[in-house]
């Protein structure tokens, strides 16, 4: 058992390396967003270390910059990170039933899209130490990248900062576009989301709303309508 | 910023952790309700899309470089390049475009 645990931990560390590299670059641009919102490097690093969610942190920094209320922020985190509910459900089926509460609490801490992805792809049941191996490599990349992003935002020339600002958007595209290739409904929903989001940025009705509330409203509206009109077949569910 | 940053960070961390850990610890059975499953399936795609567009046009020095990054990023993502290459190429697109704008 001891030996088995060590093997899984090492395998996790190996799979954590590419995630570390991706996290480092992406969180660097997140640091710039944090700096724009008025956070210090330490605050931004702490946020990355404790939250571990690209879209969630980005949305939160946007709301902070706008001086949103605590309730608004909590609702935003709930909506933006709602997908982790499903991942957490899926992963609970992957763990051996006898897995202790402590292991479940620890695995949940850094359940990101990428770490969920590699953990769920392990053959057979998941040994928690595999996930820990991934996390010890990947999580520091996320936190350190954010820290350096805040600091370098001051030093870097304006055109480099402008270029790095789209890094996160690029990552979001890499998450949403590939599944849309195989799923026409999803492609249509992404197209509709772009159109409605674009329209909302011009509609006078939304002028008095914070950008966070517009995102929440559009998400609940579009995802809700899509769920009713195009219920997902069980097989599609695994595609995440 | 009018509110306390540390409290903001605490709320972010707490809400996100609860979302991640509650199903893992409490719900041992799968969610059966098809509508809720479907809604949760679509949420990340809608949220990420709405956050990306049209914000990407306002993030850069010129909306045209933002648009170019959107197009390049979409094409590369369509070709299933990973997170890292897509993010880097989107950045490079903006950098190169803005040398000429």
Image: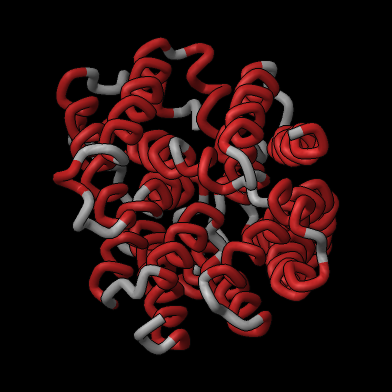
Q: Residue at the front extreme?
A: B101
Q: Is residue A120 left or right of residue B30?
A: right
Where residue A124 sits, quadrant-wise, is top right
Which residue occupies 38% across, 28% down? A194
- In percent of width and height, residue B22 lies at 34, 64
- In percent of width and height, residue A61 lies at 48, 67
- In percent of width and height, residue B47 lies at 38, 42
Q: Is residue B80 above or below residue A14?
A: above
Which residue occupies 44% across, 37% down? B54
Q: Is residue A231 left or right of residue A111?
A: left
Which is nearer the eye, A150 or A183? Answer: A150
Which is nearer the eye, A98 or B25? Answer: B25
Visible residue check, residue A4: no
Where residue A30 sits, quadrant-wise, is bottom right
Which is nearer the eye, B95 or B101? Answer: B101
Which residue occupies 62% across, 18% down? B78
Q: How is the image coloured?
A: secondary structure
In the picture, the quarter occupied by the N terminus of chain A is: bottom right
Where residue A117 sits, quadrant-wise, is top right
Q: Is residue A126 above or below residue B39?
A: below
Q: How many numbered discs?
A: 0
Which residue occupies 82% across, 38% down? B99
């Amino acid at each position: 058992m001891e030996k088995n645990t060590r093997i899984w931990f090492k395998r996790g560390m190996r799979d954590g390396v590419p995630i570390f590299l991706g996290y480092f670059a992406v969180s660097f641009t997140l640091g710039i967003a944090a700096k724009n919102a008025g956070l210090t490097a330490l605050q931004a690093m702490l946020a990355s270390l404790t939250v571990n969610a690209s879209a969630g942190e980005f949305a939160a920094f946007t709301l902070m910059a706008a001086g949103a209320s605590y309730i608004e922020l909590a609702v935003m985190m709930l909506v933006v990170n709602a997908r982790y509910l499903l991942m957490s459900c899926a992963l609970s089926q992957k763990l051996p039933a006898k897995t202790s509460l402590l292991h479940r609490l620890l695995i949940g801490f850094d359940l990101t899209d990428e770490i969920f992805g590699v953990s769920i792809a392990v053959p057979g049941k998941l040994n928690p130490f595999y996930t820990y191996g991934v996390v010890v490599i990947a999580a520091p990349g996320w936190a350190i990248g954010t820290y350096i992003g805040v600091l370098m935002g001051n030093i870097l020339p304006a055109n480099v900062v402008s270029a790095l600002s789209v890094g996160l958007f690029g990552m979001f595209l890499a998450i949403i576009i590939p599944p849309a290739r195989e799923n026409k409904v999803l492609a249509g929903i992404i197209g509709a989301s772009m159109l409605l989001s674009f329209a909302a940025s011009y509609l006078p009705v939304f002028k008095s709303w914070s950008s966070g509330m517009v995102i929440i409203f559009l998400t609940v509206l579009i995802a809700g309508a899509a769920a009713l009109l195009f219920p997902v077949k069980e097989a599609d569910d695994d595609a995440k | 910023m009018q509110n306390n940053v540390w409290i903001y960070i605490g709320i972010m961390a707490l809400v996100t952790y609860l979302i991640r850990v509650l199903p893992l610890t409490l719900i041992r059975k799968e969610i059966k309700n098809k509508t809720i499953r479907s809604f949760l399936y679509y949420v990340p795609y809608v949220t990420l899309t709405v956050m990306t567009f049209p914000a990407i046009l306002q993030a850069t020095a010129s909306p045209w470089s933002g648009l170019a990054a959107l197009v390049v990023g979409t094409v590369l993502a369509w070709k299933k390049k990973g997170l890292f290459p897509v993010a880097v190429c989107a950045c490079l697109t903006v950098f190169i475009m803005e040398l000429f704008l």
